[in-house]
Image (cartoon, rainbow, N blue to C red):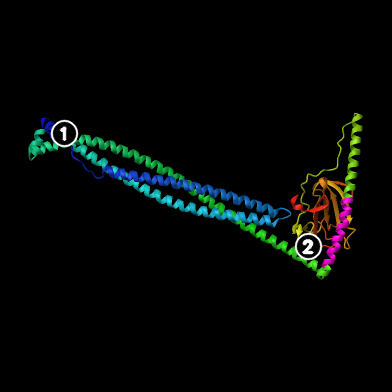
């Protein structure tokens, strides 16, 4: 024991080396932590890409839904239809780009995770080597403690060797304690890295499933878009065919431009005469309706005075300024300037169309655009080739005209009608290019675009 004390006082603790140094493991843990920071940033980018992908997919679904409604509804609007298809096409293109970006990010993330798992595995192997080295030194120290000092002196070459060995074993105890503490800390760090790595791998799998779901949804939406484009193309062809047929019939009606102008002038003159008569009829119908309303009010007041059962009084229907689309079919000619040369000149327009032409099958139901009173039913008396028309007066100075109907009397002048009520059937009477409805809207005696109120 004296020799041990002397040795401890003369020599310091030696520097030990093992299969794996603490600095190596610390470096690997630091590198793994830096790689995990990159992983978190990559996962955040993927979440952002996935969110944008889901928003674009929702926009594509909304546009395709609107396209379906346009294709399945009545009064098909090709302008709105083309806009919805373009919106869906652009949204699906963004979805495809985001999906490709997400798949690229997932590939990078998988490779980073693999490298991180390799580094964690190497760190664990190095840590196991350090444990074994520590165990070996502890075993050596235990054996030395059970060897007598006399045996050590006899076996050593000199007294200085005994002192050196004894001093080393004394220093080993402090260094081994520090090494054991560092091993425990490194083990905790590795366990933490494994937990974060497992959570990142789980999130990656979720993102991969979301990307796969997006790919399935993208294929379904692309199929819907292809179907919508095909239907839209068929609809455009149908409208163009109807327009060609109308032009062909127009050529039959007017053999040359001079005759067409003469017909247009006659039509304009007849329209003016009809407009004047319609204005008078609408005013008369409104006065008659007002008288009927006053009479009903007086009868109701008398009944109330007699304490009789309160009766419901039907008043003249009042419109709300918003008109219902009058018939199912295809719009072949809009309101305003047109290239259809049978229409008369107005202002800067060589040919101006006062209404909206809706083509459809003969006998298609025609509906009142709003509540009102029927002002006129019959053949246009001011046209050389008269069409069968129905004119309805509405509140707020509105009136609507429905021309080229089949000559079937469904309603009569002076009758109150409700919004959506059947008032006639689509036909081709008068100067007509085929079975269609000429729908005309007037406000305070002047024609207006019916689309602004429908």
Vertical placement of residue 218 versus 254, above or below: above
**Is residue 132 highlighted in magenta?**
no
| Rendered location of residue 436, percent (x, y) | 79, 59
Q: Which residue is rendered at x = 44% and y = 46% of the image?
A: 41
Q: Main secondary structure of the magenta part?
A: helix
State the SS at label 1: helix
Distance between the alpha carbons at the discs numbered 2 and 1: 119 Å
Q: Is residue 75 left or right of residue 403?
A: left
| Label 1 CA crowd tier, 10 Å (few <14, some 14–19, many 20+) | few
State the SS at label 2: loop
Q: Comparing marks 2 and 1, which lies closer to the viewer? A: 2
Vertical placement of residue 218 versus 166, above or below: below
Which range is magenta?
260-280
Q: Can the viewer see residue 305 in this picture?
A: yes
Q: Disc 2 designates what residue?
A: 351
- In this rendered view, identify the residue nearer to me: 305 or 122: 305
Q: In this view, does 76 lie to the left or right of 119?
A: right
Q: Which residue is rendered at x = 66% and y = 53% of the image?
A: 68
The N terminus sits in image quarter: top left
| Rendered location of residue 350, percent (x, y) | 77, 63
Q: Which residue is rendered at x = 19% and y = 35% of the image?
A: 171
Vertical placement of residue 424 versus 299, above or below: below
- In this rendered view, identify the residue nearer to me: 276 or 297: 276
| Rendered location of residue 122, percent (x, y) | 32, 47
- In this rendered view, identify the residue nearer to me: 37 or 321: 321
**Marked residue nearer the N-terminal end (2 or 1):** 1
Q: Disc 1 designates what residue?
A: 145
**Is residue 270 highlighted in magenta?**
yes
Q: In this view, does 230 lie to the left or right of 11?
A: right
Task: Specify the farthest residue to the front.
Answer: 347
């Amino acid at each position: 024991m004296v020799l041990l004390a002397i040795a401890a006082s003369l020599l310091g603790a030696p520097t030990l080396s093992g299969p794996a140094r603490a600095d190596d493991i610390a470096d690997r843990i630091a590198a793994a932590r830096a790689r995990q920071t990159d992983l978190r940033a990559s996962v955040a980018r993927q979440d952002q890409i996935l969110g944008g992908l889901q928003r674009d997919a929702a926009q594509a679904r909304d546009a395709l839904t609107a396209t379906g409604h346009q294709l399945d509804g009545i009064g098909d609007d090709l302008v709105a239809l083309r806009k919805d298809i373009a919106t869906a096409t652009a949204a699906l293109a963004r979805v495809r780009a985001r999906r490709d970006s997400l798949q690229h990010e997932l590939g990078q993330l998988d490779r980073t995770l693999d490298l991180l798992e390799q580094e964690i595995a190497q760190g664990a192997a190095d840590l196991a080597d350090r444990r074994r080295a520590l165990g070996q030194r502890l075993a050596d120290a235990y054996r030395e403690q059970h060897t007598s000092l006399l045996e050590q002196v006899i076996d050593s070459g000199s007294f200085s060797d005994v002192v050196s060995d004894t001093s080393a074993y004394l220093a080993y105890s402090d260094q081994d304690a520090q090494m054991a503490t560092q091993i425990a800390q490194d083990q905790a760090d590795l366990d933490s890295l494994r937990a974060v790595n497992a959570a990142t791998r789980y999130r990656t799998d979720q993102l991969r499933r979301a990307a796969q779901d997006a790919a399935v949804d993208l294929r379904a939406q692309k199929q819907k878009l292809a179907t919508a484009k095909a239907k839209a193309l068929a609809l455009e062809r149908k409208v163009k065919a109807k327009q060609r047929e109308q032009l062909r019939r127009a050529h039959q009606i007017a053999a040359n431009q001079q005759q067409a102008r003469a017909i247009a002038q006659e039509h304009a003159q007849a329209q003016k005469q009809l407009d004047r008569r319609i204005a008078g009829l609408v005013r008369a119908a409104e006065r008659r309706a007002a008288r009927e309303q006053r009479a009903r009010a007086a009868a109701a007041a008398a009944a109330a005075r007699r304490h009789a059962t309160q009766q419901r009084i039907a008043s003249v229907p009042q419109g709300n300024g918003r008109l219902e689309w009058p018939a199912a079919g295809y719009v072949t000619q809009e309101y305003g300037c047109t290239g259809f040369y049978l229409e008369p000149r107005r202002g800067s327009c060589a040919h101006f169309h006062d209404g909206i032409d809706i083509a459809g099958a003969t006998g298609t139901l025609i509906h009142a655009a709003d509540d009102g009173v029927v002002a006129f039913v019959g053949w246009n008396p001011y046209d050389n080739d008269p069409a069968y028309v129905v004119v309805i007066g509405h509140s707020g100075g509105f009136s609507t005209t429905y021309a080229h109907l089949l000559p079937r009397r469904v309603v009569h002048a002076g009758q109150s009608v409700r919004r959506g009520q059947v008032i006639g059937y689509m036909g081709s009477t008068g100067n007509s290019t085929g079975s269609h409805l000429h729908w005309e809207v007037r406000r305070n005696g002047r024609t207006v675009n019916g689309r602004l109120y429908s």
